[in-house]
Amino acid sequence: MLFGSFIYNNSWDGASRTLPYGLGYLWSAAKMKLGLGVAGITISLMAATAQADCPDYTTYAQSPQGNPSSGPLGLPYMRPDPACRTFNSTSVEKVILEMKSRLKDPDIARLFENTFPNTLDTTVKYYNERENLAFIITGDITAQWLRDTGNQFSHYHTLLSVDVDLANLVKAVINNEARYVSQYPYCGAFQPPPESGLGPSVNDWALGVLVNPPVDNQTVFECKYEIDSLCGFIKLSSSYYEATKDASMMNAEWLAAIDQIFRVINEQSQASFGADWNFISYYNWTGLAGSLAGAVNNGGNGEPKGYTGMVGTHHRPSDDLSTFAFLTPANAMLSVQLTNLATILDHAGVAPNVSSQAKHWSKTIEQAVWEHTVVDGIFAYETNGLGSRYVMDDANVPSLLSLPYLGFLDMDHPDYVKTKKMLMSRGNPYYAKGRSFSGIGGPHIDVWNPWPMSQVSNIFGTNDDEEILSSLYTIVNNTGGLGLIHESINIYNISDYTRPWFAWANSYFSEMLLDLAQRKPHLIFKDSKPYTPGQ
């Protein structure tokens, strides 16, 4: 597999550098041989050499690797060799050292050491600073999900103002995603950009699937419409601008992508039937006979919906079909991210008409969430605007459990407190509890496989020290001895898990530890002094 051309600038100062997986040692040799006499050296190397030296991380993550931690769990060191990492940042390494020196539990310190850099260590499949393009995989699937990427980089937010090279990487991710969204706003997962030289992957679950509007599978990996995917793009854009104040991100492609997002919002907020009973459909998706993906009712349109002011979605953040179109946590996230979008546009003095739209829709959606989804102090996960509601939760963020993390409400809001109590109990059909592990799962795997991600969300949703520690050690004690955060865990057999390499979950876990480092330092540190990376 050819990695393509990667630009290394003469101004390299060691703060951050791009290392195509397995080529770090070759770059070091090339730098010495070429002497960096010309700015912007381009190096093209065959990855066949790298493959002989660097293990596939999907395989690597399935068994313990480095020396165990000194804690009772003896968790292994799971980072690839520096020469095999896909991006290196001294600011990230500094955070790891600082956190390790202060964390009082060696096993938690090892988990942070493994998870905090995992996105940079393993998922930067392609990056060219001059082209302003980066392709980020989600882990063991070679595709770039808008939702996953927005979350995979979330915990680096405070470093973007102090690490120019890391910021440039994020900017390149945003620019690549802008190209995707401007062309295919209803899709959430994509193939590598042509410039990368990386060939597209075949997604068996996308074969035999009819999608309207039609897509090109050379560009699109999977076209399941999930409104939170578009939220992820806005989230990453807002995080970048807030940290850097670099308005050059808001180029023509980015503005075209934002325009397409508002197109989707306008289309998917409409009721299924118009005033004259014409059926309104802007997007539909269904598996044809013989496909792995099953058929979707009503010609691929799913269940009908009425008008509420919320925006409908076809699939959930888990990539599973929605039961009802109005997904409460996705709309909550959309409301928050549209406010963030307006804030950065206003600060940059860019596109005031777009900012006005964002403010209007943010308020409309927020009001609709409170009006149509809460009954007797309990949020529904999904509604249809026609009187039907589904009370449950799914582990994938955005979720009802993650509403405080999303910034939609305060964790002490009485409706959230009541809803949260129900979600973490038998009242939620996708809550499950075994002897060692418990949490919320979803239909993506099965009802007896809760996700560690749900326990992370639970920590973001409480100030109770005992509850925080209970959720934290439910995660820490159930990594299967591998020192990474899995997708899901079987409550009947904790050694039975899915996805040993899941970058989003690793990022979310380390982001939670950084939140505790600021909010509850006494719970995890040897002292009570708060800590913020980059400060």
Image: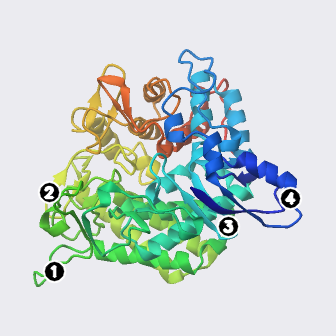
Kind of residue indicated by mark 3: Lys
Tell me the number on the disc at residue 274. Answer: 1
Report the Cα–Cα distance between label 4 and label 2: 67 Å
Count of numbered circles on the image = 4
- Front tag of 4 and 3: 4
Kind of residue indicated by mark 2: Ser
Q: Is residue 427 left or right of residue 530?
A: left
Image marks 4 and 3: residues in contact by CB distance under 8 Å: no
Report the Cα–Cα distance between label 4 and label 1: 66 Å
Q: Is residue 365 left or right of residue 30?
A: left
Report the Cα–Cα distance between label 4 and label 3: 35 Å
Q: Nearer the viewer, residue 411 or 76?
A: 76
Residue picked out by circle 2:
388
Badge 2 density bin: few <14, some 14–19, many ≥20, Cα 10 Å? few
Quadrant in which residue 111 is drawn: top right
Residue picked out by circle 3:
245
Evaluate whether residue 86 shows in this view. Answer: no
Image marks 1 and 2: residues in contact by CB distance under 8 Å: no
Q: Secondary structure at mark 3?
A: loop
Which of the two discs, 4 and 2, labels the residue nearer the N terminus?
4
Which of the two discs, 4 and 1, labels the residue nearer the N terminus?
4
Task: Locate residue 166, reporting x and y percent.
Answer: 68, 55
Q: Secondary structure at mark 2?
A: loop
Residue picked out by circle 4:
34
- Front tag of 4 and 2: 4
Tell me which residue sits at (74%, 52%) in the image: 16
Say which quadrant the N terminus sits in: bottom right
Tell me the number on the disc at residue 338. Answer: none
Which of the two discs, 3 and 2, labels the residue nearer the N terminus?
3
Which of the two discs, 1 and 2, labels the residue nearer the N terminus?
1
